[in-house]
Image: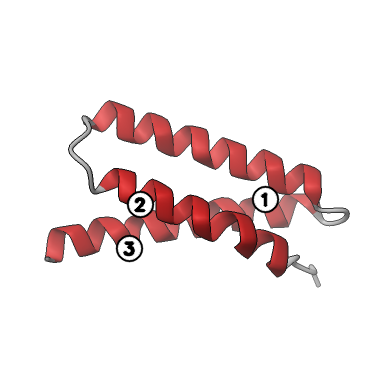
Amino acid sequence: MTEYNWKLINSFSIPAGIITGLIFTTGLNAFLKYLILIVVLAAAGLTIHNLAPSQKKPNAFTSTALIILIVIIFHLFKNLF
């Protein structure tokens, strides 16, 4: 069973996801939005990978998945309202 470092994942991924989600609601062109998303995902994955003492790979994947989930939620709310 894999142990996740939820405190580390949540403390980095949730703010990064909210900021990226807010960027997705702005009027930037699609290229810049996705470029920023890729940069944030890479930064989150590498940061969590380097800061987590053990089980680095699952923590990094969970961090990036959480950011993608938050961005999708922001995008859906933007389209609904």
**SS for callout 1:** helix
Place of residue 54 in the rendered image (x, y in percent of width and height, measured from the top left): 87, 56
Q: Residue at x 58, y 36 (%)?
A: 42
Quick check: 21 left or right of 30?
right
3 or 2: tag closer to the N-terminus = 2
Quick check: 43 left or right of 46?
left
| Residue 45, above or below 32 | below
3D distance between C-alphas at marks 3 and 2: 8 Å
Residue pointed to by mark 3: 73
3D distance between C-alphas at marks 1 and 3: 20 Å
Quick check: 63 left or right of 29?
right
| Residue 23, above or below 73 | above
Q: Residue furthest bottom?
A: 1
Q: Amino acid at mark 1?
A: Ala
Residue pointed to by mark 2: 21
**SS for callout 3:** helix
1 or 3: tag closer to the N-terminus = 1
| Residue 49, above or below 34 | below
Q: Residue at x 21, y 30 (%)?
A: 29
Whether residues under marks 1 and 3 lie with C-beta atoms below 8 angstroms apart, the answer is no
Image quarter for residue 50? top right
| Residue 1, above or below 35 | below
Q: Amino acid at mark 2?
A: Gly
Place of residue 74 in the rendered image (x, y in percent of width and height, measured from the top left): 30, 59
Q: Nearer the viewer, mark 3 or mark 2?
A: 2
Whether residues under marks 3 and 2 lie with C-beta atoms below 8 angstroms apart, the answer is yes
Residue pointed to by mark 1: 60
Q: Amino acid at mark 3?
A: Ile
| Residue 6 marker | none
Q: Residue at x 43, y 60 (%)?
A: 69
Image quarter for residue 63? bottom right
